[in-house]
Image (spheres, rainbow, N blue to C red):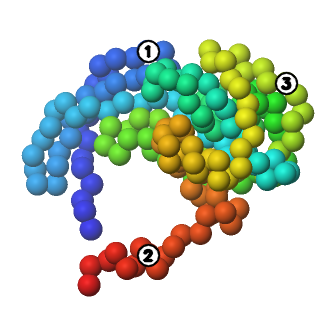
Amino acid sequence: MTTAWKSLGKRELLRVGERLRVFAEHIRLPDGREIEDYLQFSTPPFATIVAQTCEGLFVCERHYKHGPKRTILSLPAGGIEGEDAQVGAKRELLEETGYASEDWQALASWIMHGNAGGGTTHSFLARNCRKIAEPESGDLEEIEVELLSASDIMAALASGEMPLVSDVAALLPALMALGLLVPNWRSIQCCAPK
């Protein structure tokens, strides 16, 4: 078992409201070495929603994202604003797409960067979604809502049209929970060293 690093303190280098904080952490490694400026950052938590309609289609969004600097396909997602993660997910789904559901399942929470920290995404599956309103996100992006089949989503992932790691992290457990993705353990085992 590996030994945890020991934090000896940290100092804030940058703060942009609640949107971004950057720290230099003073750490001691298990072998005794010390690093005085191990960079860490934090961003607000957000929710990523795999929303499936009663007809089995998935609610997706096509919009420009400035991170990849292009128009992409993504799942509904948005910031958690001091509320329970599932409450935030329900709010974001309705605001961005006009869809709502009474059948929610928490999937997982994921840390976005293994060493530097970053934000946490909370992934949810919303089944039996129905459109109950027009989207009113108030976001910077112009969002086009699209309904896609599971095979269309897999094709979008394979082509790079759906490039966000938070989408992949939400889709994997969601598709497994829906029985649409079954791991091929035989092929995984055959790759193990003999």
Instruction: Write the residue at 87% across / 36% down.
Output: 131
Q: CA distance from mark 3 to mark 2?
A: 45 Å
| Mark 2 element type | helix
Q: CA distance from mark 1 to mark 3?
A: 32 Å
Mark 1 or mark 3, earlier in chain: 1
Q: Position of residue 162 (x, y in %)?
A: 54, 39
Residue of label 2: 187
Q: Nearer the viewer, residue 145 or 106?
A: 145
Residue of label 3: 134
Instruction: Write the residue at 44% across / 41% down.
Output: 112
Q: Position of residue 111 (x, y in %)?
A: 45, 44
Residue of label 1: 16
Q: Nearer the viewer, mark 1 or mark 3?
A: 3
Q: Is residue 113 left or right of residue 6?
A: right
Q: Nearer the viewer, mark 1 or mark 2?
A: 2
Instruction: Write the residue at 24% across / 50% down.
Output: 5
Which residue, as the protein is rendered here, is positioned at the far bottom?
Answer: 194
| Mark 1 element type | strand
* Vertical arrangement, residue 106 with respect to residue 144, above or below: below
